[in-house]
Amino acid sequence: MSLLYPRNVRAAHINLIRGHAPTLFSNPILYLQHKLSPYNARDKRAADRTDWFMTEGSGYREIQATKPQTLGYALADSPVGLLAWIYEKLHDWTDEYPWTDDEILTWVSVYWFSTAGPAASLRIYYESVHDPHHGRARTEEYIPK
């Protein structure tokens, strides 16, 4: 909505936008501060986790952005497949949270029993990549360079 009606939407939630280091020409003061200030241990761990995610943990995004319908048929056909698909994300994305069986089955049930079905959540990834006016690159306009 914020991309369609920027004058009317006062706030927007965006996610998975990876920040970039400031450049000498975009913000000279931040550039120098970034170059002269070493990362602390927490920042290094966060950067390492982000690098891991971008190389090892984001395959789901590629398939959902390119072939969402194929994956949708598979998830709608197999409750066990849907369980495996969702459990992998819960495990990898929640920093060792001790999921109970009831919590996991609740997540799976939301997708399995929804009117739209398990494939409904996949389409937005395809649309964000294939819409030149409202896609991911446009969303990055929110991040100052």
Image (cartoon, rainbow, N blue to C red):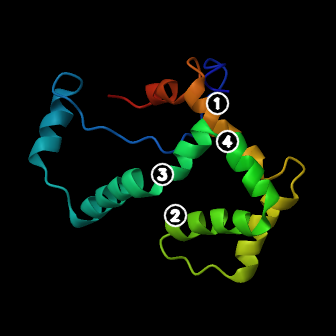
The kind of residue tagged 1 is Glu
- Pointer 1 residue: 127
Looking at marks 1 and 4 on the same chain, the residue that comes earlier in the sequence is marked by 4
SS at mark 4 in the image: helix
Position in image of residue 7 (x %, y %): 62, 17
The kind of residue tagged 2 is Trp
- Pointer 3 residue: 58
Query: Alpha-carbon distance for marks 1 and 4?
Result: 10 Å
- Residue 23 appears in which quarter of the rendering? top left
Position in image of residue 81 (x %, y %): 71, 65
Closer-to-camera residue (32/52): 52
Looking at marks 3 and 4 on the same chain, the residue that comes earlier in the sequence is marked by 3
- Pointer 4 residue: 68
Q: Quadrant of the C terminus?
A: top left
Compared to residue 21, the image places residue 138 above or below, namely: above
The kind of residue tagged 3 is Ser
The kind of residue tagged 4 is Pro
Question: Quick check: can you spot residue 51?
Answer: yes
Query: Alpha-carbon distance for marks 3 and 4?
Result: 15 Å
Query: Alpha-carbon distance for marks 1 and 2?
Result: 23 Å
- Pointer 2 residue: 93
